[in-house]
Amino acid sequence: MIGLGKMGLSHLAIVRSHPEVNLVAACDSNTYLTDVLGKHTGLKCYGDLDRMLDAETLDAVVISTPSKLHAAMVDKALQRGLHVFCEKPFVLDVRDGARLIALADAKGLVTQVGYHYRFVGAFQEAARVVASGALGEIHHVRAEAYGPVVLRPKGGTWRTAKNEGGGALYDYACHAIDTVGMVLGAPQSVSGVVVNRLFSRDVEDEIYCTMHFGSGASGQLAVNWSDESYRKMSTRLTVWGKNGRLNADRQECQIFLREPHAARPDLPKGWSVRYTTDLTEEVWYYLRGEEYSAQIDHFAKAVQARRTDGVNNFRTALETDRVVAMIRAAERGDAPTPGSGLAAGPTRVPTRPGFLERLFGRGREPVARAMGSR
Ligand SMILES: NC(=O)c1ccc[n+]([C@@H]2O[C@H](COP(=O)([O-])OP(=O)(O)OC[C@H]3O[C@@H](n4cnc5c(N)ncnc54)[C@H](O)[C@@H]3O)[C@@H](O)[C@H]2O)c1
């Protein structure tokens, strides 16, 4: 275990109680924390990653340090031939991500990133329904994430520092973007990016943008971590297809079909609801939600089987990082530069023909700037 803060301690409890994982050691630069843990739990603790890696014989690591440290720590672990579970976001610079994927591939190592929504039954059902084709051609998606993280001016932690991976974009939006990736695949470009500060000085508190998909579908992202009307982070996905619509959140997946579809005979015309409680298998240890334990179990099993194409591997996580980077670039007003690792090029946004176009045929289609038209 590397990093024993808010997320690391959750992972620690889950990993330690996993029947097939032997937790060898932990590492955190906060010596007060490691002293207390070592004394009261008997866990072997280190204050420095290199010292731990030099001293211990390990198969895998779980990295839960502040986000700007991920790339360098993942690199060290992979160099030593260790399988890696890393918290989200995977990396802050997509070029690091591409390099680390190549390294993991070359060594045949298992990788995973902590996008736990991919283990929530309702979102998995949403992905199945979309993949089945029952909704017909998908033309729009809306991904939302709201919660009460920053409700007054505050500062002083890595979460409030832009260059350390702080802000609502890295903290909240990447979850919503990753969930879109899970259900529809990642968008090719973004436009109309709005990034606002409400209480924070250095980082954004809310983000809105339009997403453009290779299929021609469009999407909207709405994220606000300064919304006190929510008790904790709430993520919601709505997908519109020509044959219906679905809404998914952590609790349930609601599906509306205009007409029944052969691919999903269990879904009648009209509304159906699938509940996460019915779609979720029991886990050996419950903390925060089954998905947190399920993702660690998935990683442990992937390591045992040496399966490198599991859920949330570095490849899919980097797709999410790419979208985050496109939003950042649009916020700065930058065009994508060669070698930046971002999918570039203007995206042709399909539009429905207007009245004049229907009369006289299509003229020039509007072209959205790939990196945000402001
Ligand atoms: N998946 C999720 O829902 C979720 C939720 C919260 C956080 N996270 C992610 O988990 C990561 C950690 O977030 P957090 O909330 O636990 O942060 P945190 O600040 O509570 O904890 C970070 C820990 O890392 C330690 N650390 C810092 N530098 C270190 C170093 N050089 N070597 C070893 N340890 C070091 C700190 O002492 C601290 O204990 C972030 O990447 C964050 O985005 C994910």
Image (cartoon, rainbow, N blue to C red):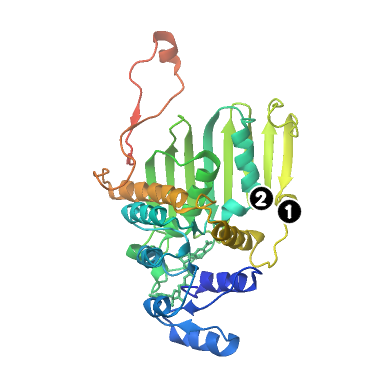
Question: Is the CB–ligand 1 distance for label 2 below 8 Å?
Answer: no
Residue at x 50% of width, y 57% of height: 112
Q: Residue at x 61, y 53 (%)?
A: 119
At label 1, the amino acid type is Thr
Residue 221 image position (x, y, % from top left) = 48, 45
- In the image, 79 versus 165, the foreground residue is 79
Q: Secondary structure at mark 2?
A: helix
> Residue 277 shows which numbered tag?
1
| Residue beneath disc 2 | 121
Residue type, numbered disc 2 = Gly
Some atom of ligand 1 lies within 8 Å of the CB belonging to the residue at label 1: no
Q: Can the viewer see residue 78 in this picture?
A: yes
Q: Looking at the figure, which quarter contains the C terminus?
A: top left
Give neighbour class at mark 2: few <14, some 14-19, many 20+ (Cα, 10 Å).
many
Report the Cα–Cα distance between label 1 and label 2: 8 Å
Q: Do callouts 1 and 2 mark residues in contact (Cβ within 8 Å)? A: yes
Please give left or right for residue 293 compared with residue 312 in the image.
Answer: right
